[in-house]
Amino acid sequence: MRLRKSHVIRFLERKSGVWERLTIDECAEEVVNLLDDPSFQETPESQRIFRNLALGAHVRSALRQDPRTSKMTISIAAKDGVVTLAGLIDVTQEAKDATDIATKVDGVKELESRLRVAGPARTLHMEG
């Protein structure tokens, strides 16, 4: 769970029942205290979500670092080692380059490619 300002405010309301103005040090202390709150503890589900996000970020990084795929604007999703690449790529780009790079990333067990090559732009001529 991502810590947001609203969590701190709700926590303070629960704790004191009143709105308080906090110094930065007091706020930092409250945030540290939230770490002991059970709703902020790691769970197997939160660890799985984090692993999925990390794997997606590693795949995106690998694609950005390779000149063949660095300009691709695609969607990357990861779930339990299965990575899905989706989106439209330019006719000058190769979907195989993206899939080859992504499959080499540590942690990728399976890859689903939903990449489609965008056709050349067509000009519509209307008469009348």
Image (cartoon, helix red, strand yellow):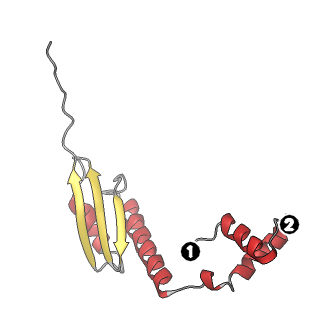
Q: Residue at x 79, y 70 (%)?
A: 27
Farthest residue toward the top?
A: 128
- The image quarter containing residue 48 is bottom left
Instruction: Residue type at mark 2: give it.
Output: Thr
Q: Residue at x 73, y 79 (%)?
A: 32
Image coords of residue 88 (percent x, y): 27, 51
Where is mark 2, residue-wise?
23
Q: Quadrant of the N terminus?
A: bottom right
Near-viewer residue (23 or 109):
23
- The image quarter containing residue 24 is bottom right
Where is mark 1, residue-wise?
1
Image coords of residue 57 (percent x, y): 44, 68
Instruction: Residue type at mark 1: give it.
Output: Met
68 w.r.t. 77: above or below: above
Upstream in the sequence, badge 1 or badge 2?
Answer: 1
Image coords of residue 89 (percent x, y): 27, 51
Q: In this rendering, would 124 be left or right of 18?
A: left
> Whole-Å distance between the Cαs marked 1 and 2?
24 Å
Label 2: element kind: loop
Q: In this rendering, would 24 be left or right of 53?
A: right
